[in-house]
Amino acid sequence: MADLHFELVTPERLVRSEDVYMVVVPGVEGDFGAMAGHAPVMTVLKDGELKIYKTAGGQPESINVAGGFAEVGDNGLTVLAESAGE
């Protein structure tokens, strides 16, 4: 399966821009996993951890996020967070 293009952006800077296998996003209506080919969706973030899987079956890297939005579209997953820290 093709990789998912993932970007994490805060008002201060572009935190991440890379191709990954999957990202688990903390949405207000529940956490969801975004992979390449995911249906378009937009959600409000809840404070929590983004879990970034670089490979299938790999260990996730976690980044804490607070506030903001996540959008899955034709260009991949974009997370616009009020703040993000590793």
Image: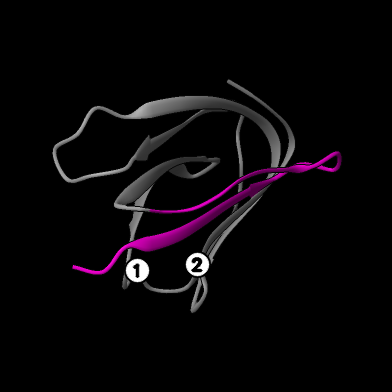
Is 47 placed above or below 7 here?
above
Residue positioned 53% across, 26% down in the render: 63
Furthest residue toward right? 12
Judging by the rendered image, the residue that carries numbered circle 1 is 38
* Quadrant of the drawing holding the N terminus: bottom left
Judging by the rendered image, the residue that carries numbered circle 2 is 41
Three-letter amino acid code at disc 1? Answer: His
Where is residue 59, by image quadrant?
A: top left
Left or right? Give the position of 85 relative to 31: right
Category of crowding for the residue at label 2, using alpha-carbon neighbours closer than 10 angstroms: few (below 14), some (14–19), many (at least 20): few
Is 35 placed above or below 40 here?
above
Residue positioned 13% across, 38% down in the render: 57
Q: Is residue 15 magenta?
A: yes
* Quadrant of the drawing holding the C terminus: top right
Furthest residue toward front? 18
Image: magenta residue range: 1-19
Where is residue 15, by image quadrant?
A: top right
Q: Which coloring applies here?
A: one colour
Q: Is residue 13 visible?
A: yes
Where's residue 25, x and y in %?
46, 42
Furthest residue toward left? 57
Category of crowding for the residue at label 1, using alpha-carbon neighbours closer than 10 angstroms: few (below 14), some (14–19), many (at least 20): some
Residues under numbered marks 2 and 1 in contact, where contact means CB atoms less than 8 Å apart: yes
Residue at disc 2, secondary structure:
strand
Left or right? Give the position of 68 relative to 1: right
Where's residue 45, x and y in %?
61, 41
Three-letter amino acid code at disc 2? Answer: Val
Q: Main secondary structure of the magenta part?
A: strand
